[in-house]
Amino acid sequence: MRVVVCTIVHHPADARIYHRQIRALLDAGHEVRYIAPVGLQDFRSERTGPSLQLTAVPRAAGRRRAGAILAARSALAEHAAGADLMLIHDPELLLALPSRRRRPPVIWDVHEDTAAALSTKPWLPRPLRPPAAVAVHTAERMAERYVHLILAERGYVTRFAQPHPVVPNTTYVPDVPAPPDDGRRVVYVGHLSPDRGTAEMIELARLLRPRFTVPNERIILSYDMHIGAQRISVSLATIEFKPAGKGTKLVLTEQGVFLDGYDDAGSRERGTKGLLDQLEAALR
């Protein structure tokens, strides 16, 4: 089977899209055409293979979405005739689909609460957020009439008038786990929401902090961020201090979890770099 997978909003290495769905399709022997912002620096070309072909499109970010939607429409139209199935991951792509007569069956994988996420978008003026959320809900209900849906969380079921299968995120676990190293570490890889244990993660970090923090060597902390009353992220950060010649090397490792579809767009990384630059300037 030949499958076209498309996203213009998510990172091309998104865990659900690339590491779970595309991997499962390839493992089952299917051919995949992946239309995504694959030009990003941290998505290398060696990820391709004989059964996986990439088509680069711009990433939709902020108010600059029209160009990405038009590019996706062109790519989807080009590859629709040779496909047995289309799998889309963004509500914006509902505007980019070829006509029904010129496309194969379409599945929309719903793994974001788009209407709720609009309330946190700084690029969307506050007075427009409520009507935009209503428009999104209306579009979601209309989409049920002409595409198939799968949902990533059971909490999404009530957003739609018809029943749709729920396909939760799962994790590939190796048959033989890697041996533990000498360090005492707790690592979580994935997205968190209140239903997936955000509160438990914060409490775990609080309980482990006295055991993992080493004076003059390592600091472990957890924190969350809010916009108004809405919590947008939870982070677990490790700060390590290592000798480096006559000075000290600071290593900061942060695992950030963005909640309810909040689009960070790289601002956390830029902000952290700015803080480290200011710290360096103050210590000189």
Image (cartoon, rainbow, N blue to C red):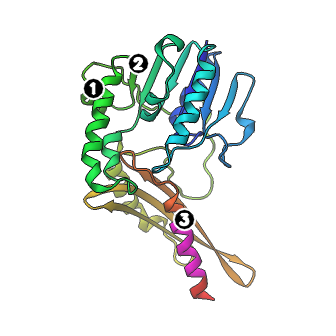
Q: CA distance from mark 1 to mark 2?
A: 13 Å
Q: Secondary structure at mark 2?
A: loop
Q: Amino acid at mark 2?
A: Val
Camera-side residue of 202 and 167: 167
Between disc 1 and disc 2, the foreground one is 2
Percent from the top left, x then y, of residue 183?
Answer: 59, 59
The answer to whether residue 262 is visible is yes
Residue type, label 1: Phe
Count of numbered labels shown in the rendering:
3
Q: Secondary structure at mark 1?
A: loop
What is the x, y in percent for residue 154? 31, 30
Q: Give left or right: position of 54 versus 95.
A: right
From mark 3 to mark 2, how far is it between C-alphas? 38 Å
Q: Secondary structure at mark 3?
A: helix
Seen at 31% across and 41% down, the residue is: 115
Would you name the residue on which mark 1 appears? Answer: 160
* Residue 156 magenta: no
Residue of label 2: 147
Query: Neighbour class for label 2 at 10 Å: few (<14), some, many (≥20)?
Result: some
| Residue bounds of the magenta highlight | 270-280
Q: Which mark is residue 270?
A: 3
Q: Earlier in the sequence, mark 1 or mark 2?
A: 2
